[in-house]
Image (spheres, helix red, strand yellow):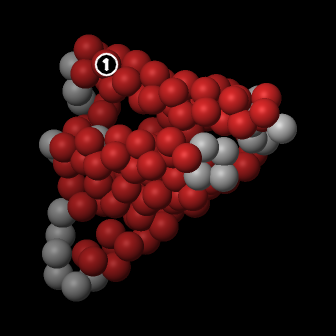
Amino acid sequence: MSLLLTAAVGAAQAWLLRQYLPIAQWLGVTVAGGGIGAALAIGVGSLGVNSLNIVSVSVWAGTAITQWFLLRRLSSRSIAWLIAGVVQVPIASNQPNSMLFQPPIVILVYGIVTAILMVWILQSARMRLIKK
């Protein structure tokens, strides 16, 4: 379920980024990051650690890291995306697939904060394009 939610959020982000990156490229790194995170969590699970929280956190963290690798080409502000990835860990680790079970206001606030962050990152990318 975490991977489906990750893909849905990635699709919304891709729409915001469409002026800077091909939508398929953003969706690709988003899904790949989530998949890598899930695979790592499954590997940890095979060592005897059995927690769905680890899967949720791994999917979110893997996604944030792969997205950052792509964003860093656009903006020096992209490091803020990794910081946002750290901030979202308590939300993701609250319970398995917790974004689905959070009160709507938590999801709304998280969406607004990440959208503002994305716009802030992209403003420096836009300035870089204008200067060229």
- What amino acid does circle 1 point to? Val
**Splitting the image into 4 quarters, where does residue 49 fall?**
bottom left
- Residue at the front extreme of this rendering: 131
Residue density around tag 1, few if under 14, some if 14–19, many if 20 or more, within 10 Å: few
Name the residue located 24 percent from the left edge and 61 percent from the top edge. Answer: 54
Q: Residue 53: give x, y in percent of width and height.
A: 21, 55
In the shown orientation, is residue 119 left or right of residue 23?
A: left
Name the residue located 66 percent from the left edge and 45 percent from the top edge. Answer: 74
The answer to whether residue 17 of the structure is visible from this angle is no
The answer to whether residue 130 of the structure is visible from this angle is yes
Identify residue for label 1. Answer: 109
In the shown orientation, is residue 22 left or right of residue 99?
A: right
Name the residue located 70 percent from the left edge and 29 percent from the top edge. Answer: 126
Vertical relation: 8 (above or below) 65 = above
Q: Residue 27: give x, y in percent of width and height.
A: 65, 46
118 or 55: nearer the eye? 118
**Splitting the image into 4 quarters, where does residue 132 fall?**
top right
124 or 45: nearer the eye? 124
Vertical relation: 80 (above or below) 46 = above
